[in-house]
Amino acid sequence: MPNPLNFGSSLGTMNAVRPYRISPDDQQLIVTGEKTVIFGTHPNDNVELWFCDPDGKSVGSIVLDATSEHLTLSTILDTTGTFEVLNLNLETILPAVPLAPGRYGVSVYLFRNEVGSITNKRLYISEISPSRTELKLNTADFTDLESQNEIYEFIVPSVPRLYAKGLVDQLFAKNVDQIAGESINVVNASSNIDEILANTMVRVFNAEAVPSYNNLFQYIKEETYVRAVEKLKADTTNYNVQSRDIDSYISTALDEVISELVDTQRVDPRFNLV
């Protein structure tokens, strides 16, 4: 629970009011966009409840994971659509805190742990910049490999495994809603090659090898896609997949395909695959 003394204004009345701890100025610093997320779709989802007395003083808290018996999910269907609602059973939660009989305000926070957790390893603020827009975090407790991977994933964007499969599909033009220029093809691939080896397509044309070149490219593309997806499925070490992982799946698959083509001498002798 944030220390009430750190805020410029008190919570005020607690009657039918949801306490809001973020000032409008701070809101501009931390909110970059919103998206809809169904709670409980990740094993690290949890709910924090903080209870305050009428003076705004914290008197108790509890952390509930997504599988807690105190939580249920309901579906509401009306004329505007279907909505999922998270239910918190205060009758069973309050005895678990516990609290003495009285009048309290409650703040509810929905979180997804990215690094550590409130009940496990924690990051501590060791320094705040003069502008109060940057923090230096203490990571002394995060020395094991699993924790270091959590920190790396927190810093480097990652996506769930199903999304990673979609990104690979998109790159190899296997997705349904294709957009021109977003996937690899013989034209943009040759353009990238030309940055290193000038006039590649001119040489292919002069050698009258365009059909052979296109067939070779298509085979490599299709086989690389299949193997990259297989490597994605086989790698179950992390829940999320990072860009370096996708790069590794594709580059490793590509190396395998090219090596097999060279070893079996199935390449037009006018081409030299390296």
Image (cartoon, rainbow, N blue to C red):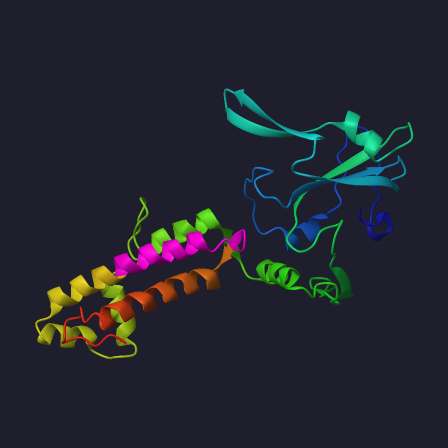
Rendering coords of residue 85 (x, y %): 61, 29
From the viewer's side, name the closer residue of 231 and 196.
231
Rendering coords of residue 173 (x, y %): 29, 52
Screen quadrant of the C terminus: bottom left
Q: Is residue 274 above or below residue 183?
A: below
Q: What residue lies at 55% left-to-right and 28% top-to-bottom?
A: 83
Q: Quadrant of residue 116?
A: bottom right
Q: What residue lies at 47% left-to-right and 61% top-to-bottom?
A: 245
Count of labels in the image = 0
> In the rendered structure, does residue 7 fall within the stretch colored magenta?
no
Rendering coords of residue 155 (x, y %): 59, 62
Taking the image as drawn, is residue 14 in sight?
no
Residue occupying the far left of the picture: 208
Taking the image as drawn, is residue 106 in sight?
yes
Rendering coords of residue 265 (x, y %): 18, 71
The magenta region covers 221-240
Residue occupying the far front of the picture: 264
From the viewer's side, name the closer residue of 83 and 166.
166
Query: What secondary structure do most residues of the magenta stretch adopt?
Result: helix
In this rendering, would 157 be left or right of 273? right
In this rendering, would 41 be left or right of 63? left
Q: Is residue 187 above or below residue 159?
A: below
Q: What residue lies at 88% left-to-right and 36% top-to-bottom?
A: 53
From the viewer's side, name the closer residue of 52 and 138.
138
In this rendering, would 192 be left or right of 214? right
Q: Quadrant of residue 203?
A: bottom left
In this rendering, would 119 be left or right of 272? right
> In the rendered structure, does residue 238 fall within the stretch colored magenta?
yes
